[in-house]
Image (cartoon, grey):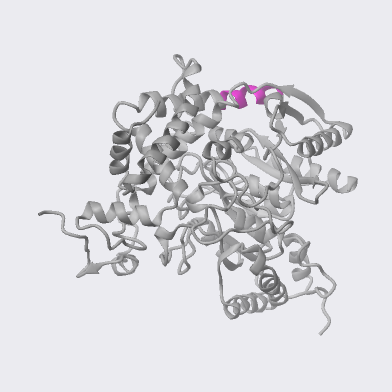
């Protein structure tokens, strides 16, 4: 049977375009998910984006049910009938929830995260759970307890992390959209390395209920998609105050979609000079300069700003994140979830051996560091000091937003690197997070969008960052820049 | 700051992570390296700065103390490695 989707490249197709085809009756959801499942079958042996993929029969049955609802003329949301992948640290009832850790081997989520509930109400079709660095600790998805995801643009290279599975799935056409989570760049950096769009919302905009906690004062769930419009649509669905998350912000709901194409020409773009120093890859630098030039030529005012507490932010971040991790990960004790060690006679020994056997090296290192900085006698020197520096980092942003509306800068110092090349030295690995952790510490919304490729065809990306709850403006500018860069291509 | 083997063992105990005696030195080296790296925080004058615990300086919301969840004990205990008569079982705690 001939259909509109026959000539369509599912790897390139965006969710909103397919949604318009669905609404016009040109294709069915069943056809879409069948094509995406075929991509999974073809590419997953190499990409390894998923830790679990639902049975095809279940996915197709969901799609048929959606098609039936559409035929009956039921009002359906903008994501209805589109297949979506979810990072394996977000609870989907009845599905595995491992956080990429062996300590949660076999654990099945007993409830839906609030974001998943919202997606279900919208009629999204759940495809599977995506790979990640264990508990969100890492920058390459090499730190998963299960498998190493590869970059769909270069199978010898990392996809970035920690939402590497979600970014790779979208980039490979193995999902139309995905949810990731971002603690210090875990949505934006893999999006950059995989050539897709990734948005970390303002802290408190999206409910964290059902997101397994790593560093509670930093992390947010956000969209990973093929373009800015899809990210805006997905954010529109998942944003909003949730009584079940005491850190979610009480604010009126905003509309991120209907005025997406109406970017104000008066926005002032700020370039933080500390983000363009040593350590930034040449091709990445040139691509970001080209993106800046495109905006400047289009009439936007571009100013240089200074954010002096950028370098110190890495030390601050690793104290706060590891302190929160040592507390949040105390619950994995072999009593209530997952696996239990058979070594150790006493209860304490059993817990210590369970954690030793099941946590990976980076997780153990961070828990021990966090335990130390919170221990008696050291709290003020490390944790309290880091909390003060965190305010200075945020003040840098507040000062910058006095003179500009949106910051433009790199998200990753380099394009994707070869698997195994960087993971041995923890401090080197932490340093690569310099451009992404500051927005996390300050709680600012930030988006990564593709801005070209290297000579060896690896994706490059640029980050835009706005003040608290300025997602609408941020997305408008990101959309505008995406259009300008598309014309240049 | 440089951590001794005794300090690493103490941290490992507090964190309930068993570590092999022959790996203690490697942990001491790794953790000391990170602590040396974060020592640069000491160069920043923060005497007049209030610590920041929440990016929006928002206080935790309270809710009425009412039961909102149904009893799901069996479902929730089904993920435990060892349960009997509605209780979580652990190795002997008291000698």
Is A398 part of what is drawn in magenta? yes
The part of the image, by quadrant, that contains residue A62 is bottom right
Task: Determine whether, in the image, residue B31 is placed left or right of residue A264.
Answer: left
**Front residue (pair A145, A19):** A145
Does A176 sit above or below residue A215? below
Name the main secondary structure of what is drawn in magenta: helix
Percent x, y for residue A52?
Answer: 54, 68
| Residue at 60% over, 26% down | A310
Q: Position of residue A101 (x, y in %)?
A: 45, 57
Q: Nearer the viewer, residue A80 or A325?
A: A325
Count of labels in the image: 0
Horizontal side, residue A288 vs residue A95: left or right: right
Q: Is residue A466 left or right of residue B54?
A: right
Quarter of the figure with the N terminus of chain A:
bottom right
Magenta includes B94? no
Residue B29 seen from this side? yes
Write down the region rendered in magenta. A394-403
User: Which residue is located at x 41 percent, y 46 percent?
Assistant: A364
Residue farthest toward the bottom in the current orientation of the protein: A1
User: In the image shown, does B79 or A315 lie closer to the viewer?
Assistant: A315
Q: Does residue A76 appear anywhere in the picture?
A: no
Residue ranking furthest to the front: B22
Task: Give residue A31's position: percent from left, percent from top.
Answer: 72, 76
Toward the viewer: A178 or B62? A178
Residue at image position (80%, 67%) is A9
Q: Position of residue A482 (x, y in %)?
A: 80, 46
């Amino acid at each position: 049977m001939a259909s509109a989707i026959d000539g369509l490249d599912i790897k390139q197709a965006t969710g909103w375009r397919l949604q318009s085809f669905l609404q016009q009756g040109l294709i069915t959801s069943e056809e879409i998910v069948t094509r995406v499942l075929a991509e999974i079958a073809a590419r997953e042996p190499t990409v390894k984006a998923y830790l679990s993929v639902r049975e095809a029969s279940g996915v197709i049955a969901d799609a048929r049910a959606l098609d039936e609802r559409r035929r009956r003329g039921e009002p359906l949301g903008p994501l209805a009938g589109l297949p979506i992948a979810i990072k394996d640290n977000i609870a989907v009832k009845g599905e595995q929830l491992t956080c990429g850790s062996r300590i949660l081997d076999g654990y099945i989520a007993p409830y839906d995260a609030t974001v998943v509930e919202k997606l279900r109400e919208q009629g999204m079709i759940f495809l599977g759970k995506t790979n990640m660095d264990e508990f969100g600790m890492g920058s390459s998805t090499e730190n998963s307890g299960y498998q190493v995801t590869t970059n769909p643009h270069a199978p010898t290279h990392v996809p970035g992390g920690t939402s590497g599975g979600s970014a790779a799935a979208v980039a490979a056409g193995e999902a139309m959209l995905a949810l990731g989570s971002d603690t210090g760049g875990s949505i934006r950096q893999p999006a950059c390395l995989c050539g897709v769009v990734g948005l970390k919302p303002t802290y408190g905009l999206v409910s964290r209920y059902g997101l397994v906690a790593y560093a509670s004062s930093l992390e947010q769930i956000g969209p990973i998609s093929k373009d800015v419009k899809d990210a805006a649509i997905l954010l529109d669905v998942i944003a909003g105050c949730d009584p079940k998350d005491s850190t979610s912000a009480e604010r009126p709901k905003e509309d991120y979609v209907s005025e997406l194409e109406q970017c104000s020409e008066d926005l002032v773009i700020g370039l933080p000079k500390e983000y363009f120093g040593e350590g930034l890859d040449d091709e990445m630098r040139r691509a970001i300069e080209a993106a800046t030039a495109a905006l400047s030529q289009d009439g936007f005012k571009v100013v240089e700003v200074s954010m002096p507490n950028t370098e110190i932010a890495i030390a601050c971040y690793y104290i706060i994140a590891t302190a929160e991790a040592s507390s949040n990960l105390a619950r994995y004790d072999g009593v209530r979830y997952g696996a239990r060690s058979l070594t150790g006679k006493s209860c304490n020994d059993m817990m210590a051996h369970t954690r030793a056997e099941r946590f990976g090296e980076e997780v153990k290192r961070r828990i021990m560091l966090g335990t130390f900085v919170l221990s008696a006698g050291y709290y003020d020197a490390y944790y309290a000091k880091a909390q003060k520096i965190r305010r200075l980092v945020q003040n840098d942003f507040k000062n910058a937003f006095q003179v500009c509306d949106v910051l433009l800068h790199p998200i990753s110092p380099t394009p994707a690197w070869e698997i195994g090349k960087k993971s041995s030295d923890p401090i080197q690995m932490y340093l690569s997070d310099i451009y992404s952790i500051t927005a996390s510490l300050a709680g600012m919304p930030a988006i990564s969008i593709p801005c070209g490729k290297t000579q060896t065809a690896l994706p490059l990306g640029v980050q835009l960052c706005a003040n608290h709850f300025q997602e609408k403006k941020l997305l408008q500018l990101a959309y505008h820049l995406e259009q300008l860069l598309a014309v240049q291509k | 700051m440089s951590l001794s083997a005794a300090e690493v063992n103490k941290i490992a105990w507090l964190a309930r992570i068993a570590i092999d005696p022959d790996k203690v030195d490697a942990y001491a080296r790794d953790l000391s390296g990170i602590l040396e790296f974060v020592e640069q925080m000491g160069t920043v004058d923060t005497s007049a700065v209030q610590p920041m615990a929440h990016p929006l300086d928002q206080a935790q919301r309270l809710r009425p103390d009412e039961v909102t969840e149904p009893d799901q004990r069996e479902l929730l205990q089904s993920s435990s490695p060892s349960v009997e008569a509605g209780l979580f079982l652990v190795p002997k705690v008291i000698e």
